[in-house]
Amino acid sequence: MADDGKETAVNVRRQPEELPVIADGLGKKYRRGWALRETFLVIPNNRIVALIGPNGAGKSTLMGLITGLLRPTIGEITVFGDRPTGKGLHPSVSYLAQQKPLYQQFTVAETLKLGARTNPTWDQRYAEYLIGRAAVPMGAQVGTLSGGQRTRVALALALGKRPSLLVLDEPLADLDPLARETVLRTLIAEARTQGITVLLSSHVLAELEGVCDHLVLLHKGRVLMAGDVNRLSADGTPLGELALNRMRQAAQEEAA
């Protein structure tokens, strides 16, 4: 690696001093009712966070509030010390949804150029490095790529922004098991190398085992459990089993 003081494709970006997420009495209400309420939550720096919960638990709403795509009904949330405006992403946050909104007619190179035009913190060399590692042709149209390749392009677009927090909403759901494993392994390696906090929502608990070191468990719009996995599971209970046991307990308490 060069030592001339210039940034290279694999240099670690300097991180903000504030915590990635602090929620204080956070709640979001829609016409149908509360999607999230009484949420007190802290997400520390340099964690791979598993966001777990059944459908309707409030995961997407929480991610929407963190990314600034939604505004809270009550309470407060700060992202790296700033309050999301509800009008767009915080400069230090990247968000990747399951749908991976990419322009199918664009080439991979054109997709990266779009990233450069829309992100002031864009790192073209790093984005190209990620595409190169994935062996995706720069001249190929996005619509002709496999699902795994499109996901790698979407991740390069998200990581090329050089975020300090990467929010992922079921990003691997449309991939086959081998592609899921490959993409997840690459993503986590990059996150740890670059010092990025990752918030990863997934229904496949098995793929989070041994990957995530922090857990946020939601149930009916409330936080059931949150904290570092090694603290929550001092006896070595696997993350998935830990979450399922707590959800079963909550269901039994509700039925009593």
Image (spheres, rainbow, N blue to C red):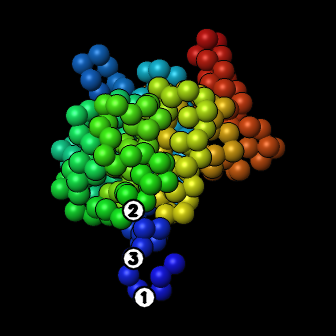
Earlier residue among tags 3 and 2: 3
* Residue 3: % across, % down: 47, 86
| Alpha carbons under labels 1 and 3: distance apart | 9 Å
Callout 2 environment at 10 Å: few (<14), some (14 to 19), or many (20+)? many
**Residues at discs 1 and 3 in contact (Cβ within 8 Å):** no
Q: Quadrant of residue 65?
A: top left
Q: Who's the residue at 43% across and 21% down the image?
A: 56
Q: Quadrant of residue 70?
A: top left
Q: Secondary structure at mark 1?
A: loop
Q: Secondary structure at mark 2?
A: helix
Q: Quadrant of residue 245?
A: top right
Compared across the picture, whether 249 is left or right of 50 comes to right
- In depth, the one of 65 and 75 nearer the eye is 65
How many numbered badges does the structure rendering display?
A: 3
Q: Who's the residue at 61% across and 11% down the image?
A: 255
User: Label 2 belongs to which residue?
Assistant: 126
Question: What numbered label is drawn on residue 45?
Answer: none
Q: Who's the residue at 81% across and 44% down the image?
A: 235
User: Label 1 belongs to which residue?
Assistant: 4
* Residue 83: % across, % down: 27, 54
Q: From this view, report whether residue 117 is shown above or below residue 29.
A: below
Question: What numbered label is drawn on residue 7?
Answer: 3
Task: Check disc 1 and give the amino acid type.
Answer: Asp
| Alpha carbons under labels 3 and 2: distance apart | 10 Å
Q: From this view, report whether residue 107 is shown above or below residue 193.
A: above
